[in-house]
Amino acid sequence: MELTIAPIKKLIKKAGAKRVSDDAAIELAKIMEQKAVEICVKAGRLAKYSNRKTVMKKDIKLAAKE
């Protein structure tokens, strides 16, 4: 797992939770990482389709919309 628990807990609390368990933060981090990888794969394909080696902001934005 690449994401740390503390910032994830802050996000959950920002959404309105008063208390957050470590297990809840870990589970959300896993889901977020999984989704991020999916977006990165799509963005990589978009960059390759555009004959670029560099993934750009526009690739990430477009991949996230799909």
Image (cartoon, helix red, strand yellow):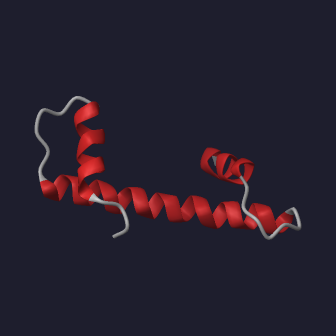
- Residue located 42% across and 62% down the image: 33
- Which quadrant of the view contains residue 27? bottom left
Please, which residue is most extreme toward the right here? 51
- Residue located 33% across and 63% down the image: 30
Q: Position of residue 47 (x, y in %)?
A: 78, 63
- Residue located 65% across and 52% down the image: 60
- Residue located 68% across and 60% down the image: 43
Q: Position of residue 39 (x, y in %)?
A: 58, 58
Relative placement, left or right, of 19 versus 31 is left
Q: Position of residue 3 (x, y in %)?
A: 35, 61
Relative placement, left or right, of 5 versus 53 is left
Q: Please determine whether, in this image, residue 51 is positioned above or below residue 5.
A: below
* Quadrant location of the N terminus in the rendered image: bottom left
Relative placement, left or right, of 28 versus 42 is left
Front residue of 6/15: it is 6
Q: Please determine whether, in this image, residue 1 is positioned above or below residue 20.
A: below
Q: Position of residue 7 (x, y in %)?
A: 30, 48
| Total count of labels | 0
Please, which residue is most extreme toward the top here? 16
- Which quadrant of the view contains residue 4? bottom left
Relative placement, left or right, of 50 versus 7 is right
Q: Please determine whether, in this image, residue 6 is positioned above or below residue 33.
A: above
